[in-house]
Image (cartoon, coloured by chain):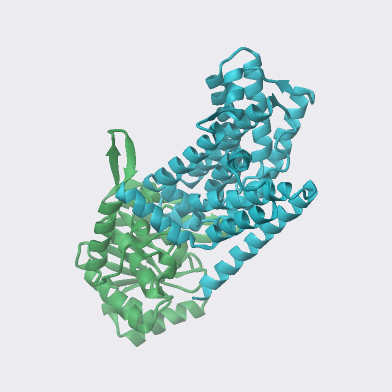
Amino acid sequence: MKKIYNKARDTVIEIGPGLFLILIFEIIFFSVTSEYFFGWGNFKNIFRASAIIGVMALGQTIVIISGGFDLSVGAVSAATGMAAAWMLRAGYGFIPSIIVAILIGGMIGMVNGAITGYGRINPLITTLGMMSIVRGLGFIISGGYDIAISNKTFLRMGSGQIFTIPYIAIILVFLFITVGLTIPKFSFGRYMYAIGSNERACVLAGVRVNRWKLVFYGSCGALAGLAGAITSARVGVGAPQINMGVELGVITAVILGGTALTGGKGKILGTFLGLFIVSTMSNGLVMLSVPTFYKYVATGSLLLIAVMYDEWRRSHFAKR
Amino acid sequence: MLLELTNISKSFGAVTALKDVSLKLNDNECLGLLGDNGAGKSTLLKVLSGVYKADSGKTFMNDTEVDFTDPLLAREAGIEMIYQDLALADELSADANIFLGREQKNNLFGFLRTLNKSSMKSEAKKVLATLGSDLDASRIVNVMSGGERQLVAVARALQFKPTILLMDEPTAALSAEKASHLNNLILSLKEQNLGIILVSHRFSDIFAVCDRIVVLNGGQIADEFLVSDGTFEELSTRVLKIMASN
């Protein structure tokens, strides 16, 4: 227990107080400016909104730390949400539907990994292409129609709660804690940082870099698959247009959380904080009755600030 | 014979980097490779370390034919290489770099292979100590000085007790003092039953530590002699003449 405490303390020190302060500032600001913001009922909304972006951001963190990038997570989540809805409609149960969503996501992710690794294609181009392909196929296969979900257990995952805590918030926190604590203990974590830090050095050291890329992109895809199932459970349908443009929030959360765009650096806890900064801002603006389109302006601005900060931090440390 | 290469050739498209190169390396010997830029020195080391695959020719280790299709196979056969740019993962600690690709693991619950960080850290400390350094093995390489990074690269090469050590311009980024320290280290390594191939542009380094020198020119062996065959001035003039003839 003490070991876990020390590890958590070291991680918090490493991330620095900046993210915590931004989050606290946001909470104070919106609590003062909106009478509807501060309360467990609204915090549950923030958690629910964070869950979908958060699960995808977790996978994105893995890929970005390893030196890659995945723009296809939103499209993959729509496709896997539809797959889960189709499975449920066909009479399969709650668990098989989620497993199929995760597997399909994982397979699409592995294709991304194969193209970027073995095919040596830039990950931005690879996943941009994949985003378009998967989104397009979703529309083609479904004919543009939603697939309604009637399985109550599945729907409860999206809207149910235990002791007033939403299930999807528990899933989110569980995933972040599990991945954050286990990653450093395995080769997965070691090579994630090593490959992002210096891919060539890893190749020369005999690390099977391309195989690991399959694993990293596959994990990201699998998490996007789970996010797709969660989204469908939230909205009650599988639909091809779900999570369109979600990549903005996902990438903003990851970069804001301190993960370096150049790879090799980042913390799962950082992404968790970045996620809540994005979600709290988004929710707070709604509570202030700010029109939705301003939310995009605010999220985009956050992303640019985060990227500029990342660039400044790198050049600052390079000079030392 | 520790290592023997026969008729090694390697081309990149229309460019011939190595043509019918044959050489031998004996136990406890340090062989120097000299030559101008593009002579094929680094390519030869990369063929030996499994980074490049030779187009033709054969490689023998202890009289057994070997064929390294990737660096891991070469490392497993006992060939370690120190690269000119050191090839370190900057965001990892020294011990993580030393064990990169060959991590020590625990068996958690009999099937989960977790990293054995404490063991790797203590072994990294030990190998650094044999190099006369008390460097903190848990420090991130990114914040280390050039000399410290060099030490980490050397420690990584020595950690797995290689039989052949390949060094590509190891002193290129070092001060004269650090280079001299590294030369002393190479001399001490030779005593440890190790064959060394050293590539350097610094003639003084090569002549200080090597027993024999092979001069490459245009991807071919142009000359070969023992360091004891003449004075530093005589032999370096001989090498320079070859380079100038290119």
Q: Nearer the viewer, residue B198 or A235?
A: A235
Residue B79 seen: yes
Left or right of A239 on screen, residue B138: left
Colour assigned to chain A in the rendering is cyan
Q: Position of residue B103 (x, y in %)?
A: 33, 49
Left or right of A84 on screen, residue B119: left
Q: Position of residue A211 (x, y in %)?
A: 49, 41
Q: Position of residue B228 (x, y in %)?
A: 26, 79
Colour assigned to chain B in the rendering is green
Q: Relative to B167, say whether B175 is above or below.
A: below
Residue A222: quadrant of the picture: top right
Q: Residue at x 48, y 59 (%)?
A: A15
Q: Nearer the viewer, residue A256 or B133?
A: A256
Residue A50: quadrant of the picture: top right
Q: Relative to B147, say whether A171 is above or below.
A: above
Q: Residue at x 40, y 79 (%)?
A: B202
